[in-house]
Image (tube, helix red, strand yellow):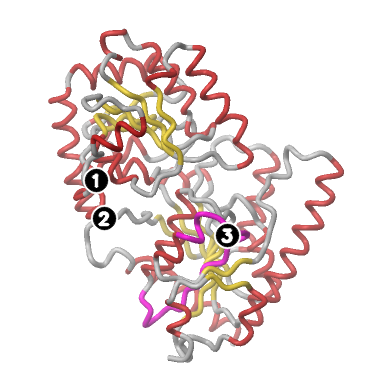
């Protein structure tokens, strides 16, 4: 088809350069704009790229739209996708001064206008928005007269007035709602929206189950002893609670902590930079700085998961963390807080240790238990691995999402007629 090689080449194309690109697949193929609210790598953003790459190209022409250049752009290229950059400042207005808020509001209005023009010009049939963190992509789609499917990655427990207002806007703009978790649907049922579905984010179970462990050379570069038991977590933002994990780690007895390393993956987004700096300071204050390794943003996460003696999801708020599923696929014993669907996934502790959120005493106790009883933890991990392989290992993983998108599109098309 005309333009198909360009769209699959992984080129990064600016929106203003696309007027000369012909429609990749004419006719009944659904053109879908997959819009990310961030250009950073996060669970929601990664799932958007994976969904765009996983949709059947015989039925969908998916294009990823980013608010700026960043790591997600590279992920899209690696997946053989075109990443279209339509600039939008990736910063929350909540912490801005009144003058900055006015400037940012004008910038958001400009983004909505540019995005709406682009969506109309490229004649998209459907818009998929990766997160309810921002409503502006949905507003642009409504202005362009295109139905919107919103993916709710959050579990919005006890939302404030501003969040409730935002979610009412999301509900009114949506033709379809996708949820990462049952807990997310319970918190935001979206009853006005006819098409709703709980769907799993993809986990590349083969990649995580067959990865090699960290080499001695890589351990040495990171400052991890060759035989150290790795306690692993992913994320340097407050919601992921790495501060709680550091405090719990410091509470371990010297004997339990000896021969271990706490490894924290990920790079903090701009709005969490100060929090990330405070984590290093906290480790120093608690006397565990030499054993806490900030490994940063890595492209070899499966290698770390395969090397973990235990993976910890200490989140204060979560829907269903992809990283927890990835750790289970890698065969690592897991500890998770009882937020979102984590308790459901771990079957009330049969497949991993479940603890209350924001409880460093409980987390320290769980770490001690796993480190002292590795065989028992490994037994739970084997059962968890089997479950994840069954849930995510099928060849028809994307079929429910495809059928959902087709239903939303067909209803919108018939309605327009």
* Residues marked 2 and 1 touching at CB (< 8 Å): yes
Q: Secondary structure at mark 2?
A: helix
Residue for badge 1: 329
Vertical comparison of 383 with 88: above or below: above
> Residue at label 3?
192
- Local crowd size for mark 1, using a 10 Å CA cut-off: few (<14), some (14–19), many (≥20): many
Q: Real-space Cα distance between discs 3 and 2?
A: 31 Å
Residue at x-position 45% and y-position 49%: 43
- Camera-nearest label, 3 or 2: 2
Query: Residue 59 lies in magenta, yes or no?
Result: yes
- In primary-sequence order, the first of circles 1 and 3 is 3
Drawn side of residue 197 relative to residue 393, left or right: right
For label 3, the SS is: loop
Q: Quadrant of residue 364?
A: top left
Q: Position of residue 207 (x, y in %)?
A: 25, 53
Few, some or many residues within 10 Å of mark 2 (<14, 14–19, 20+): some
Q: Quadrant of the N terminus?
A: bottom left
* Picture residue at 27% right of the left edge, 13% below the top: 256
Q: Residue at x 82, y 45 (%)?
A: 100
The spot of residue 290 in percent (x, y) is 40, 19
Q: Is residue 203 left or right of residue 359?
A: left
Q: Nearer the viewer, residue 283 or 130?
A: 283
Q: How many marks?
A: 3
Magenta stretch: give its range: 56-74
Q: Earlier in the sequence, mark 3 or mark 2?
A: 3
Residue pointed to by mark 2: 392
| Closer mark to the observer between disc 2 and disc 1 | 1
Q: What x and y, as percent, mark residue 138?
A: 64, 63
- For the view shown, which residue lies furthest in the right direction? 99
């Amino acid at each position: 088809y005309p333009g198909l090689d360009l769209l699959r080449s992984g080129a990064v194309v600016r929106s203003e350069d696309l007027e000369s690109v012909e429609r990749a697949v004419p006719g009944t193929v659904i053109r879908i704009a997959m819009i990310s609210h961030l250009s950073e790598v996060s669970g929601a953003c990664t799932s958007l790229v994976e969904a765009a790459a996983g949709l059947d190209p015989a039925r969908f022409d998916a294009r990823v739209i980013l608010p700026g250049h960043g790591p997600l752009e590279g992920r899209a290229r690696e997946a053989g996708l075109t990443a279209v950059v339509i600039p939008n400042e990736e910063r929350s207005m909540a912490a801005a001064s009144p003058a900055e808020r006015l400037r940012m509001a004008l910038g958001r209005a400009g983004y909505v206008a540019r995005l709406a023009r682009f969506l109309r010009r490229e004649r998209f049939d459907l818009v998929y928005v990766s997160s309810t963190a921002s409503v502006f992509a949905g507003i642009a789609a409504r202005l362009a007269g295109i139905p919107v499917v919103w993916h709710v990655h959050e579990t919005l427990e006890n939302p404030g007035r501003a969040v409730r207002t935002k979610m009412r806007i999301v509900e009114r703009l949506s033709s379809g709602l996708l949820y990462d978790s049952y807990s997310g649907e319970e918190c935001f049922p979206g009853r006005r929206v006819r098409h709703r579905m709980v769907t799993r984010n993809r986990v590349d179970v083969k990649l995580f189950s067959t990865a090699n462990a960290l080499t001695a050379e890589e351990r040495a570069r990171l400052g991890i002893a060759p035989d150290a038991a790795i306690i692993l977590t992913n994320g340097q933002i407050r919601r992921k609670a790495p501060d709680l994990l550091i405090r719990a780690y410091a509470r371990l007895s010297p004997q339990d902590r000896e021969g271990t390393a706490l490894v924290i993956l990920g790079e903090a987004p701009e709005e969490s930079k100060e929090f990330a700096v405070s984590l290093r300071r906290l480790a120093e204050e608690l006397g565990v700085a030499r054993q806490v390794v900030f490994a940063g943003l890595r492209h070899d996460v499966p290698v770390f998961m395969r090397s973990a003696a235990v993976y910890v999801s200490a989140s204060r708020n979560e829907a269903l963390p992809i990283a927890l599923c990835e750790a289970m696929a890698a065969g690592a014993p897991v500890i998770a807080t009882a937020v979102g669907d984590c308790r459901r996934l771990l079957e009330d502790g049969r497949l991993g240790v479940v603890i209350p959120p924001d409880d460093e005493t409980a987390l320290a106790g769980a770490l001690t238990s796993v480190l002292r009883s590795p065989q028992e933890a490994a037994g739970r991990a084997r059962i968890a691995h089997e479950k994840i392989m069954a849930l995510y290992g099928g060849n028809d993983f994307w079929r429910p999402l495809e059928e959902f998108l087709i239903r939303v599109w067909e209803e919108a098309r018939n309605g327009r007629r």
